[in-house]
Image (cartoon, grey):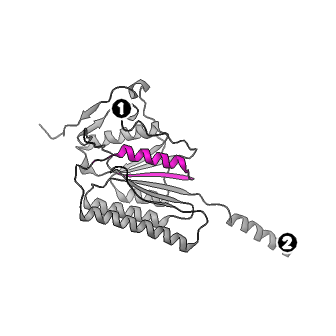
Amino acid sequence: MAAITIALIIFVSSAEAKEPRPTTQTLFIHQPNRDQQTLEKDAELIFERIRAAMNGDSVHLVTTNVNETIFTIDLPEKLNRFEKNKLEGKARKALKTYFMGLLKNPPSPDLTVDIAGAITTAMKRFNAKPHDEMRLVILSDGLQTETTFSWRGGFPGDSWTANPSSPFADIEPNSQNVPLKVLMLATKTSFVDAYHASTIERWYRLLFQTRKAHLVQFTFDHATVATLLRNGVEVKDSQPIEVDERALLGPLSFTTVKPLNSD
C-alpha cells in the first residue's frame, strides 16, 4: 500500500511540474531623442526585462525613428541555459550599442518621431504571435512629429485615431483573446503644461480603446513601470471614453496649447 501511495505522489508531482508556465511578450517602443538621464533609465528598464525573460517569452525593441528594430528575442519554450544565455547576450550587446550611440552622438531634438508607425508594427507582431501576457511599453511622449506637422505644441482631435488621412489609421486592432496592456512612459519637459500632457494621455486612451487594448499607465516615473513589469500588469476598470463614431471619421483637427503663464 505504501509503495502505491509513493508512486501516486511521484506521478502527481511530475504532472504538476510539466504544466506550462504563462508566456509573456513585451514590446518596447523607444524615442531616441530623449535627454541623457532619461536615456540611461530607459536602457536600465529594458535591460532588466531582458534579464528576467524566461523560456517561451519574447522581448522586442523598436524605435520611433523610421520604425527601426534594435533587437528581437523569441525564447523557445524548450531551451537550455547555454542557448538562453547566448540569445540574451546578443540582445544585450545590441541594446548597449544602440544606447551608447545615442549618448555619444545625441540626435537632434527635431528628429522625426513616428510613433504611429511603431505602434502599427507592434500591433502586427502581437497579432502574429500571441502570448499568454502581452505588454506594450512606449518609452516616448507620444508627440507625433513629421516634416509637415508636429504635436509638440498641442494635441490632435479624436478623428486622428481613424480618419484615413491620419498616420494612425492603419493600426490594426488586437485580434487575440488576450488583453493587450499598454504602459506609456513620457517626460514632463516635452509638454507645454499639465493640461497638454493630460490631453495627450486621454487621446492615447481613446486610440487604444478603439484597437481593443488598454492604456493601463501613463507616467513620468521609471520606477513605476519597472515595478509593473516585474510584478505584473493588471487592467484597471475605467469608464470608456464616449465619442460620436461619425466624429472619428471627421476632418483632422489640431489644437495649439497656450502656456497658462503666458500673456
Q: Which mark is residue 165?
A: 1
Q: Is residue 235 visible?
A: no
Q: Which mark is residue 4?
A: 2
Q: Is residue 10 left or right of residue 170?
A: right
In percent of width and height, residue 146 lies at 28, 42
Q: Toward the viewer: 41 or 122? A: 122
Q: Is residue 259 left or right of residue 46?
A: left
Position of the N terminus, as image quadrant, is bottom right
Q: Is residue 148 magenta?
A: no
Is the residue 79 above or below the residue 72 in the image? below
Q: Toward the viewer: 262 or 130? A: 130
Please tell me which residue is depicted at 41% across the width and 40% down the height of the picture: 205
In percent of width and height, residue 115 lies at 35, 46
Q: Amino acid at mark 2?
A: Ile
Q: Is residue 116 magenta?
A: yes
In percent of width and height, residue 177 lies at 58, 44
Q: Which residues are magenta?
A: 112-139
Choose top left, top right, bottom left or bottom right for residue 240. Answer: top left
In percent of width and height, residue 10 lies at 76, 71
